[in-house]
Image (cartoon, rainbow, N blue to C red):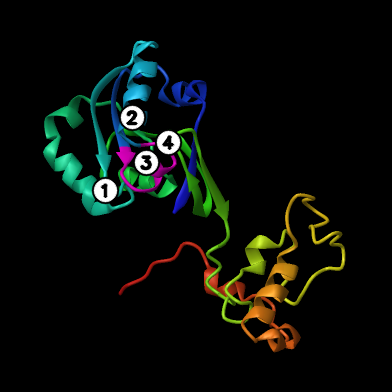
Amino acid sequence: MIITRQKDINKILAFIGDRTNIFLIGCKSCATTCKTGGEKELDKMEDKLALHGKKILGKKVLDPACSILEVKRLVRENKEVMKECEVILSMACGGGTQAAAEVIEGKKIVPGNDSLFQGEITRITATGSHFEQKCSLCADCMLGETGGICPVTRCPKGLRNGPCGGAKNRKCEIHKDLDCVWITIYKRLTDIGELKNMYNYKEPRDFTRNKQPQSLDI
């Protein structure tokens, strides 16, 4: 999922400027899980903006916000409101914000969140959640050689052929509270009987496989 963090309200207000009529868009998927763009967050944002003289003409949590089809449906169902609207405040990820910009013409599209990384959910509680980045979407996956653990992302140096030698007490020399991922890989490969993979040379990452922007037909 895409991990997001809500922008400071003053930054959002600076984007909006002197415009008044606003429509809020959230996301039922990632942003809801991150508590940055679900129904509760849209309600809270409406209250914050009202304190600054802004008027919310409508709000909708899309499923998901990054779907062009969902944004088109939103526009069809809210034609009259969209005519009066001056700003679309997207409380989704960057993909959701750009989906709105592609479909909704003649309106300023404002991001309410910063997109941080693609991450895994490790904890969700009433008091807070925790997410960890373990994949960089590099399009050149080597997990089959490293026991399902990604050194490209989980090693701060992105080393593909083993540890750097700077680890101390099994901790990374860059981030002292981070386990050295290559020690983790070593233990994993030992457990599954594939330690020989440690001795296989891994070619440098093929960056041509991850050119931007990309598209895909399935």
Q: Secondary structure at mark 3?
A: helix
The amino acid type found where label 1 is placed reads Asp
Labels 4 & 1 near each other (Cβ < 8 A): no
The amino acid type found where label 3 is placed reads Thr
Q: Quadrant of residue 198?
A: bottom right
Per the model, the C-alpha gap separating discs 3 and 4 is 6 Å
Labels 3 & 2 near each other (Cβ < 8 A): no
Q: Secondary structure at mark 1?
A: loop
Q: Is residue 157 above or below residue 103?
A: below
Q: Quadrant of the N terminus?
A: bottom left
Magenta highlight on residue 215: no
Q: Is residue 198 above or below residue 80?
A: below
Mark 3, other Cα within 10 Å: few <14 / some 14–19 / many ≥20: some
The amino acid type found where label 4 is placed reads Thr
Per the model, the C-alpha gap separating discs 4 and 2 is 9 Å
- Residue at numbered disc 3: 32
Q: Point out the residue furthest to the front here.
A: 191
Q: Secondary structure at mark 4?
A: loop
Rendered location of residue 212, percent (x, y): 50, 63
Q: In the shown orientation, is residue 39 left or right of residue 194?
A: left
Rendered location of residue 202, percent (x, y): 69, 82
Rendered location of residue 104, percent (x, y): 26, 41
Magenta highlight on residue 34: yes
- Residue at numbered disc 2: 40
- Residue at numbered disc 4: 36
Magenta region: 26-37
- Residue at numbered disc 1: 63
